[in-house]
Amino acid sequence: MTTVLTKVTAGVLLIGDELLSGRTQDTNLATIADFLAPLGVSVGEARILPDDAAIITRTVRDFSDRFDYVFTTGGIGPTHDDITADCIAAAFDLTIAERADALASLRERYAEGELNAARRRMARIPDGASLIANPVSQAPGFQTRNVFTLAGVPQIMRGMLADIGHRIEGGARTHQISVTCEGIGEGDAAEPLAGIEASYPDISIGSYPFFNDALRGVTFVARGPDQEQLARVKADLERLVARLTDG
Amino acid sequence: MTTVLTKVTAGVLLIGDELLSGRTQDTNLATIADFLAPLGVSVGEARILPDDAAIITRTVRDFSDRFDYVFTTGGIGPTHDDITADCIAAAFDLTIAERADALASLRERYAEGELNAARRRMARIPDGASLIANPVSQAPGFQTRNVFTLAGVPQIMRGMLADIGHRIEGGARTHQISVTCEGIGEGDAAEPLAGIEASYPDISIGSYPFFNDALRGVTFVARGPDQEQLARVKADLERLVARLTDG
């Protein structure tokens, strides 16, 4: 019996000058990757973009064509540099306007006096998009075709992911095993490792060195869709480690 | 007197499947941005790329055209998935071969018996590149035209930056001030903030909300080349904060 494995991929766009200046350390990419892995979706590429409308618009269009799903984070707040919603609209030639359901969501949080023009901008949604609930601060994200537009603040972004899983048609789930070996370097294992990887075309194997003050070592990580095959790879890696550390 | 301000930009390519799978959290982008800021170079875009030769090669060529400088991290170790050096060579139609000076550097670290075929791969350098010293683990990085190819392991990457500053012709240094205000949200300040930014065309201002359990607030960050102007922006921001927190 042949198992047909669907490869489903996502592209991630992390938007904001503060990520490029070094002021803010992104953590959203890893959160999204961890969220997608159990759904059988792997991240194919990520970009960190400045608050530049032309670059964001062009990249959204390109990523929407190249990947099954696209996630954007950042740029949907109330300030003048929050331009992501307009860029999504421009990317797909959609109009954008304040929407009643998004405004209703904002009213759950803000009293009438607080809901000024700046905050009402957060109710501007590209035509035809479906809202993504924001249980943390109410200003919604939205889905336009295969593009999910989420907040940049990590707590809010994580909250929005809860309203996304049911929208995704996943693929074959990728499983992972790892074997750690202290006292060797990557170069000690590189050749036999390439041999193991060549024997299992569906499995990708990486080796990741680590350094402590006095210690060096390598962690081997194998990823693939077939758990039985991964178990065989794990046994091969353990034999390799035993051989390298015996010598 | 008119001061001519040169804008010098860099693109950053973070290479490795492990960054996209969520296994490894990148920190190199922020390190590079912090290194470049005092040199008057700002990061214009960053990409996180898989270990895919076609994508890496194409992107290196594109970034080399678009930015004054390009930094790549990752993929120059001894294993089968370390393909960055070959991609750089392919991007510029250069041959690539083992080089005596790079091999000499490896010999400082590895005894003859340890210097196997896998480790010798780390001495393969695109034709015409100049080496970048690696004080941590000796396997060198290299510069090809405006592209600096560095290790992915953060300790090693930081060590290599010490051999790069003298190669960079920087621009006008960007300075930064910040003002923090507790007890307000971004939306409270968005309109007056846009007014302040409009008054200072050379200054970019961002607002970054923060959340604690019981507290919310906003940090305003202004960046630009002129410190006198930044001091005036800071005073404007402080007046804004006083007004918002008095009301």
Image: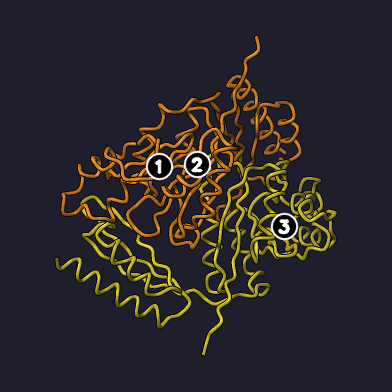
Chain colours: A yellow, B orange
**Which residue position is annotated with label 1?**
B126
Question: Total number of numbered labels?
Answer: 3
Q: Which mark is residue A139?
A: 3
Q: Position of residue A92 (x, y in %)?
A: 78, 56
State the residue at coordinates (61%, 41%). Answer: A17
Q: Specify few, some or many for label 2: CA neighbours under 10 Å numbering under 14, 14-19, or 20 or more.
A: some
Query: Do the residues at discs 3 and 1 belong to one chain?
Result: no
Alpha carbons under labels 3 and 2: distance apart: 47 Å
Residues marked 3 and 2 touching at CB (< 8 Å): no
Q: Chain of mark 2?
A: B
Residue B38 relative to residue A166: left or right: left
State the residue at coordinates (61%, 21%). Answer: B5
Residue B223 relative to residue B200: left or right: left
Q: Regarding mark 3 in the picture, which secondary structure is present there? A: loop
Instruction: Name the amino acid, label 2.
Output: Phe
Q: Specify few, some or many for label 3: CA neighbours under 10 Å numbering under 14, 14-19, or 20 or more.
A: many
Alpha carbons under labels 1 and 2: distance apart: 9 Å
Q: Regarding mark 1 in the picture, which secondary structure is present there? A: strand
Instruction: Name the amino acid, label 3.
Output: Ala
Instruction: Name the amino acid, label 1.
Output: Pro
Residues marked 3 and 1 touching at CB (< 8 Å): no
Quadrant placement of the N terminus of chain B: top right
Residue occupying the far bottom of the picture: A1
Tell which of B19 and B193 is nearer to you: B19
Q: Regarding mark 2 in the picture, which secondary structure is present there? A: loop
Residue A84 versus residue B17 in the image, above or below: above
Q: Position of residue A143 (x, y in %)?
A: 73, 63
Residue B51 versus residue B210 in the image, above or below: below
Q: Position of residue B182 (x, y in %)?
A: 60, 43
